[in-house]
Structures are given as C-alpha cells and as structure tokens.
Image (spheres, coloured by chain):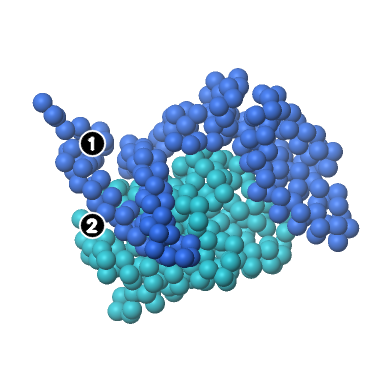
Chain colours: A cyan, B blue
Amino acid sequence: MERSLALSALFAARIAALFLIPSFTLAFGVPVTAQTLGVMLCGTVLGAKRGTLAVLLFLVLVAIGLPFLAGGRGGLGVFAGPTVGFLVGWPVAAFVTGLIVERWRGANLAVVATVASIIGGIIVLYAFGIVGMSVILERTLLEAAGLVTAFIPGDIIKAVLAGLLTAALFKARPASVLSRASSDG
Amino acid sequence: MLCLTSPVETSAHRWRPGIKFALLCAATFVLLAIDSLVFQVAAFLGCLLLFALPGRTFFLAGMRALKPLWPFVVILIVWHGITQDMADGLAIVLRLMTAVGLATLVTMTTRLSDMMDFVRWALQPLARFGLQTRLVELGIALVIRFTPALAAQGRQLAQSWRARAHQKPRWQLILPLTVAAIDDAEQVAQALRARGGLMPHNSGVPTPARTD
C-alpha cells in the first residue's frame, strides 16, 4: 500500500513537474503540452488502478488552487472552461490505457503501450473533451470535434513517445513498471 | 509552494469554503438557465466589479486567469459573425467568462489550508465506502512536497543536457525524470514502512518513528 501511494503521488508530482520545466516542447513545433504524455505514462507504467489514482490526485491539487496545468493554470476556473472535458477524461484515459497494457501481454511492450495510449489517451480522451467543449461552447459534437482535430497529430507523437518511454523504463526499472509487474509490493 | 490564492486579503478570504462553493454552484446554475444577453452582460459586469473591488493587483491577477479563454472567445465571435447571430455568440462568450471568473474568484479567495479542510469534509461520505480519507490527504501532501523537488531535478537535467548538446532538450528528459520519480517513490515507500506503514486498521497515517 505504501508503494502504491508513493508511486501514485510521485507520478502526480511528475505530471505537474512536466510543465514546470520551461523548455518542454515537442518536435516539429507542435504546440502541445507534455502533460497528456504524463497522463498516458501514468496508465502505461502504473497500470489502470494506480494510474487513475495518480491522475485523480493531480486533478484534486489543480482544483484546490495549485497552478499545475500548462501555462500556470489551475484552480476551479479550469473546471468551468471549455477544456473541462479533457480534464474529466484524464483519469478515464489513464484507466483505459493502463487496462490495455495490463491485459495485452505477449506483444512488444512499446507497441502495446503505443496502441494503449492511442486508444486511452486519444480516442477516449477526445470523446470526453469533445463532449465537454460541445456543452460549454454550445456547439454540435461535430463542430466541437473540428476545433480539436488540429491537436491530434501532436497527440499521436506523444502516444508513440509514451510507448517507447514505457519500454525503455521497463529496461531501466522492470519492477517499477507496475502495469507489467505481477505483485503489488 | 506557489498557490493561486491571492495575497491581497479580502473579506471573502474569511468566508467558509463550503459557503463559497454553494454560492458558486448556484450562480453557475443561474448563468446556465438564463439565455438573455442583457442578463449575461449584467452578470459579467458584476463579476468584473467583484474582481475590481479588492484593488488593482487582485483585478489584474483575475484577468490573467481569464486570458487562456481568448482563443475560444475569438473563435466564437468569428463563428457567430459568419452565421450572423452575434447576440447568441456574445451571450455564450459572456456566460463562459463569467462562469470561469466566478470559479477563479473562489480559488483566489480561499487559502490552501481551507481548501484542504473542504476536501476532507467533502470526502467524508466516501469513507463509508472504505475510502481512507487520510491516505488522500497524505497523497496530496506528498505531491505538494515532491512537485518542486522533481521540477528542480528536471531543471538540473535540462542544464546537464545543454552543457553537452547544441539543441535544447525536449522529450528526452521525460525518461530520466520518470526514473527519478520512481526512485523517489521507492524511497518514500520505504520511509513510510519504516515509520510503521499506513496501517488501514487504525488511524491510516504513519506513526512517526521514535528517536529517543
């Protein structure tokens, strides 16, 4: 239990730290934050349950007023804004991503984690994000989807990175990739 | 730790967070229920007035929090300009800015400790379903403690990268940062166990180790 809590808390801190590092931009000038990548990694590394807990913990801290989102945003205001669907979708995205990595064994971890990140961190997450944007901005779902498609290429790059990083992490710290570990510890 | 609570003391800082949350929920509900442009203009002006009352510093900090909404404001205005129903567009924009503004007001006038008290109170019903609220509190404390530590490690890694390469580091730092997070987590877990563990059967918080 101590290990689960510590890993969830440290991964939540890492999602926050990803924005605190000023020079964090992805290749090709894609205007994206590394935080969605952090969410994908919560799922691929910690697994469904602990990954979800880490993301929930992060969101509680954002809600109580810590400026942990990209651009120093935070507080209750972000939960009233147009991107609320993405925030609500983060824990679900981490859960789905983690669940796929936990269940789909036998294939190359980099491939599994990439596919899991695409399904959880893009398809599931955008479903929430688009519904949220559609409600707040009073657009149809199709119109809301049109507003966010520009970010999908960047997120595909992040999903591939999440896959490669998970595989590399499995080499560096195999026991700590809990989505593939058999025991709690 | 940097927090979004305003250092400019207002009378709302002394209100109980529960009251502010209830008012925020009620205000958001009313904003969603009424479509009239006149009402939305009045509500937005009222919100601006609330930001202006404590003074210039408070007002500017509040406006900074609304700044990320501008891309959406521009998109909506252009959209409704094309479809020629500007009144609808303005009502949506004003409702969005007022809702975010009021929520930001609650954040700016509530101290982190008061927020934590509120979270503790809000989690109480979940304790009946087996959630150990003290574990959540410990988790929150750990994140607050370790975010600056990990950020510092990240900056150090970035400096090391710059010392050896021409280009700025990008995604390359995520792996060492994640390894650092895992190593820190393992040490924290050991420290928690060394202090008696989390012990779900009693208080749920680690007992400090005796040093005498």
Image coordinates of residue A170 in percent, x first then y, are 29, 68
Amino acid type shown at disc 1? Pro
Q: Which mark is residue A107?
A: none
Image coordinates of residue A56 in percent, x first then y, are 43, 49
Disc 1: which chain? B
The residue shown at (50%, 52%) is A22
Work out whether disc 1 and disc 2 sit on a shared chain. no
Disc 2: which chain? A
> Circle 1 — which element?
loop
The residue shown at (60%, 19%) is B11
The residue beneath circle 1 is B206
Lateral position of residue B146 relative to residue B32, left or right: left
Pick the residue in front: B188 or B101: B188
Mark 1 is surrounded, within 10 Å at the Cα level, by few (under 14), some (14 to 19) or many (20 or more) other residues, namely many
Residue A127 at least partly seen: no
Lateral position of residue B163 relative to residue A70, left or right: left
Residue B163 at least partly seen: yes
